[in-house]
Amino acid sequence: MHTTAGKVVIVGAGQVGSTFAFALQMQGIAREIVLIDADRDRAEGHALDLGHGNFFTPRVSIAAGDYRDCRNADLVVITAGASQKPGQSRLELVGQNVEICRSIVASVMAHTRDAILLMVTNPVDVLTYAALHFSGLPRHRVIGSGTVLDSARFRYLLSEHCRVDPQNVHAYVLGEHGDSEVVAWSLATLAGVRLDEYCSLCERDCAELDREALADQVRDSAYHVIEAKGSTNFAVALALAKIANAILRNGNSVLTVSRLLVGEYGIENVCLSMPTVVDRQGAARPVTPRLRERELAALRASAETIREAQRSVGLPERLGVLV
């Protein structure tokens, strides 16, 4: 069994933040969890409810707190902000949530410059860039949840079509966590076999995979969930737990987190999702697989979409040297 490691502070105890705390508790990832929320009663209620479950889970200290609790945190996860409403794109949240991000990051930085910041609030790519700007931390220590969940959705849908375990599928969604995201078909493999070759080797007689329809399903998944129940929380909480596990347990996991690009694929001064080795240092090493020309063009277009959103709220064109 893995040993628990590290203190996690979650800023925002709404649907995503509280469900993430539950996922951390269930998996025994952290030794201490602190919930911070503008609604102190809500944070205390969640902490008490989760604490009552300690009998059934790996033991963890869970409490409501304030920004002073960031002082010795290993990981600060920011989920607070205006939520996406039915029919609303993530980028439509940008103005309000950049200002919330500014305030939260200043409060965190007043008490620690040692923690890794994980941005979850949407639009996550713009807010990851904003958090880098507001914090001045090294670029590898400020990351966004990015397309970790989108990539999981892609793998799930491929696994359903091909009737294989999702853990035997490797596939990535790149770029914006949003409408311009890029489903990288050229990188998809099943059991080590490229998707382009897999169908000819498979003995199942099934309908041809409609790639465009599947990509639309991946891209629109959150819209469908929000329309049906008002918010997404379970799958994103599990995605966050995966990222937290890679950081706190030095997992060296390859995850499509949002990070600052500094020239990869000719893209710089924008945060977007690419396969990245995530460990105790945060975004430790980039992975830059060869992409097809069509995918590369789509990735650059996605970067420009994010860049335009950054400009719209007055974020700087470049952040300088963030080693």
Image (tube, rainbow, N blue to C red):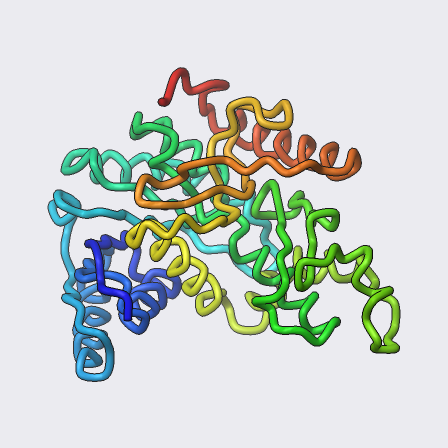
Name the foreground residue: 89 vs 235: 235
Query: What percent of the width, then of the height, locates residue 303?
Result: 61, 32
Residue at 65% in and 45% down: 181
Q: Is residue 212 left or right of residue 269?
A: right
Name the foreground residue: 200 vs 211: 200
Name the foreground residue: 280 vs 69: 280
Query: What percent of the width, then of the height, locates residue 220?
Result: 66, 59
Where does the C terminus fall, quadrant-wise?
A: top left
Query: What percent of the width, then of the height, locates residue 206?
Result: 86, 76
Which residue is the extreme one toward the top?
320
Where does the N terminus fall, quadrant-wise?
A: bottom left
Q: Is residue 310 left or right of residue 320?
A: right
Q: Is residue 209 left or right of residue 267?
A: right
Residue at 74% in and 47% down: 186
Residue at 29% in and 30% down: 135
Question: Does residue 256 lie above or below 213 as drawn?
Answer: above
> Where is residue 107, by image quadrant?
top left
Query: What percent of the width, then of the height, locates residue 116?
Result: 29, 41
